[in-house]
Amino acid sequence: MKKPAFIAIPICVFVLAAASAFAGVTVTSPTNGSTVSTSVNFVASSSTSCSKGVASMGIYPTPYQLAYTVNGASLNTSLNFNPGTYNVVVEEWDYCGGATTKTVNITVKTGQSAVYVTSPANHSTVGSPTKFAATATTTCSLGVASMGIYTAPNQLAYVTNGASLNTSLTLSAGTYNTTVEEWDKCGGAATTPITITVNSSGQTFWNVHSSGGWNGYAQQPPNYSDCIGCLPSGPGTTWAMYQNIKFPTMSGNSTQFNIGGTMDYSDVLWNNHLIGDLSSQGLPDTNHTLVPTLHNFTYDVWFYSSNIGSSEALEFDVNQFFDGMGFTWGHECRVEGGNEWDIWDTVTLKWLPTGIPCYPMQNAWNHLVIQVQRTSNNQELYQSITLNGQTNTLNWQYAPFSAPGWWGITVNFQMDGDYKQTPYTVYVDELNFTYQ
């Protein structure tokens, strides 16, 4: 738990190969990230590069628990689930001894009619087109008939059949009190209001977690400087990053981050240069004309861990450098360290407690949206932190620091080790970065 680092140092990044383009599982029901009732309908099909074809398919609600199998290349069945969050694996086996899988993350609820909106976050600032993703449950025995989006009272902008929606709407700049609604087949309905501010001039890097350009390195006590000579194999600090992970995932390709070792309270920071020097996104800004014009940034990410309690803290940072000035918006979710958000003060070079609780869920996907701004007089403004739909507004300001020789915009993801450097894993998905 130290100040964020900014220098990119190459390390070995291990990438898992994707499955063959000629084999795969397609799940049409339930949709990934959806909330469903206790009786879950599964509809899936599969293909294979094996000349003999697909032999059978099956459903694993949890690892090693095969709940259903059927011969052939398709399935359509309903299974009963207890309330909770599941990473369900649908698998196909072919006649050549091969197999492929598809993971679907679902949340099972019971006894209520409700709408669950996963995107956009409530009280968030978004670009246009704006992505809306939501699912619905109902107490009606006949199920959900349709869902829709109201961008204003009595203004139905979108409607679709079924218990889920995933679409993008083109909206002009401004603040919208939107409502996502479901209508069931018994004549009932449920709604969830979502307030958003649309900044139509913003640009977004999508799925940064799966792009190139990530570098990771250890930060060790007592001074926590970037450990240039440290190798990922340790022994003091060990770390690894694996892209293109199929389980667990929301988008179909998550990224796995691991930390371990023998040096207590050591950390690992991963960094990606998006704009300017060492840009991984094709925006080197060699003429130094883009970076100084950018003021507003949104760090939007989903993360998952089955042993989140072993984390001393998780850190999510935005950095900007130009004309000898450095701006670091550091956000640290202290988990084992006290379940509170801290932010980084570039003046005192200390982490400051915000009083905002941070309790990420274990064995479930957590949605984090961080919004920050460089003000017109070059001050760092921490605007808001939204975790799992709960928004807390800060509006705290700090001065920049001296950073000669750097030019660009970077993002960080950091994992901190605890008092016995307990190893743990975090999966990151749908990391989107919006700038204006």
Image (spheres, rainbow, N blue to C red):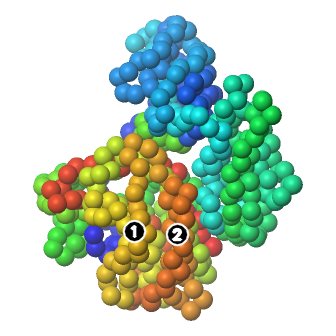
Question: Would residue 256 appear left or right of 322 to someone viewing this image?
Answer: left
Label 2 amino acid? Answer: Asn
Q: Secondary structure at mark 2?
A: strand
Local crowd size for mark 2, using a 10 Å CA cut-off: few (<14), some (14–19), many (≥20): some
Who's the residue at 27% across and 69% down the image? Answer: 1
Image quarter hosting the C terminus: bottom right
Mark 1 lies on residue:
341
Who's the residue at 27% across and 64% down the image? Answer: 337
Q: Position of residue 379 (x, y in %)?
A: 51, 88
Q: Position of residue 391 (x, y in %)?
A: 55, 65
Mark 2 lies on residue:
392
Q: From the viewer's side, name the closer residue of 56 and 41.
A: 41
Label 1 amino acid? Answer: Trp
Q: Residue furthest right?
A: 154
Determine whether 173 is above or below 304 in the image: below
Q: Quadrant of residue 62?
A: top left
Q: Which mark is residue 425?
A: none
